[in-house]
Amino acid sequence: MVKVGVAGYGVIGQRLADGVALQKDMELVGIADLAPTLSIRALKERGKAAGMPGMPYDLYLVDGADKSKFDALKIPYKGSFNDLIARVDVMLDSSPGGVGAKNKELYEKAGVRAIFQGGEKNSVADVFFHGYANYEKGLGAKYLKLTSCNTTGLIRSVDCLDRNYGVDRVAITIIRRVADPGDYHRGLTNALQIDKAPSHQAVDLMTIMPHVEATGILVHTPVTHGHIITVVAHGKGGKKISAGMALDAFKGHDRIRVVRIEDGFLGNASFFRYARDLGNPRGDMYEIGLWEDSIVESGDNIMYAINIPQESVTIPETMDGVRAAMKMQSDSASATAETNKYLGLGKWK
């Protein structure tokens, strides 16, 4: 049983903790944070509602935490961040950008492996990682870094076509949500904002899949529930990928949910509402959505559009990262299949 800890119980950290807890071959030793945030308070209340003597997940406090604030709220904690690090095989670091790089010094000192989220610089890790596209490069690596939410979902779809038919070139347009739900520190009103091309997602895709030439444009939009990406892909060596071929490949992928506009999936908000109606915690969805109606041929190219649930999409690939770093499975197919099984991916088909 691989022992796992989570540093930072925020938007991603709380979902990582839940993801690890679902993996039957992993043990969530605990979570670490700095302050009694709303997420920590909600965790305590969840434990109380379930009749637990403590919280669902053991809490450890990082350096600088004010213990009196936790004591005043009767939030129990097990020990220090170093105590947590000493008890795990691998840390999943979802601390704010830049903090993970500092935490790495603690992981190195303790001889513990770590997996960092997309907010950290690539230099923090030995391998820039994706569970499908380059799993084998992560085998036994001490430090992995996940791709961003947009890049994670984008690579899922491009890798899917590439594995089935071969892809040598893609052009992407990202319609990006400006903030997560509940964020107050930034936002746009009645305005769109365009970034200079190429977007980092296109550059990151080429880092993970160096045989594919990619470029892209990113547009920030004043919404919070999900990104939408359009992709124009070119078959390797000029081989044409038909709409039917693309649809067959996408439908066979357990982390891609193929939907239709006529069924009510009108846009990003439709996916969020559907996830809530499914009873998924926080309205999360691990799969990217892909509109069947968007798959069209343009000359030798195939075009399609996907929805990225930015708060939860990287969780499956992070579980893959644990499997690679700890050599739990030796290849991408078997590792992703295990992760998918425990997260319930593909069962809806």
Image: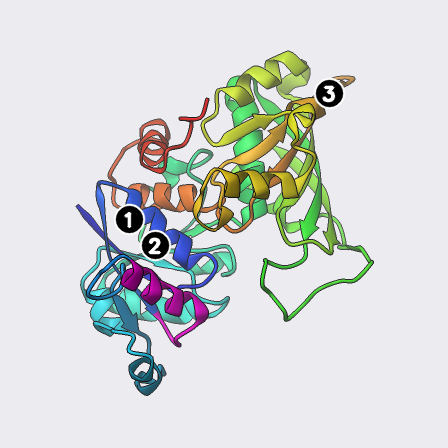
The reply to whether residue 118 is visible in this rendering is yes
Q: Which mark is residue 347?
A: none
Where 81 falls versus 119 (above or below)? below
Disc 3 residue type (three-letter): Val
Please tell me how crowded label 1 is: few (under 14), some (14-19), or many (20+) other residues with Cα within 10 Å: some
The reply to whether residue 241 is visible in this rendering is no
Dot 2: element: helix
Residue 166 is a magenta residue: no
Left or right: residue 55 compared with residue 94:
left
Residue 37 is a magenta residue: yes
Location of mark 2 (residue) = 17
Mark-to-mark CA distance, 2 and 1: 6 Å
Please tell me how crowded label 2 is: few (under 14), some (14-19), or many (20+) other residues with Cα within 10 Å: many
Mark-to-mark CA distance, 3 and 2: 39 Å
Q: Is the magenta region chiefly helix, strand or loop?
A: helix
Disc 2 residue type (three-letter): Ala
Dot 1: element: helix
The mark nearer the N terminus, 3 or 2, is 2
Closer to us: 141 or 323 = 323
Residue 33 coordinates in the image, percent (x, y) = 36, 71
Indicate the quadrant where residue 103 lies. Answer: bottom left
Residue 162 coordinates in the image, percent (x, y) = 55, 24
Residue 60 coordinates in the image, percent (x, y) = 27, 71
Q: Which mark is residue 21?
A: 1
Location of mark 3 (residue) = 296
Question: Which residue shows up at 76% across the image and 54% down it?
Answer: 196
Range shown magenta: 33-49
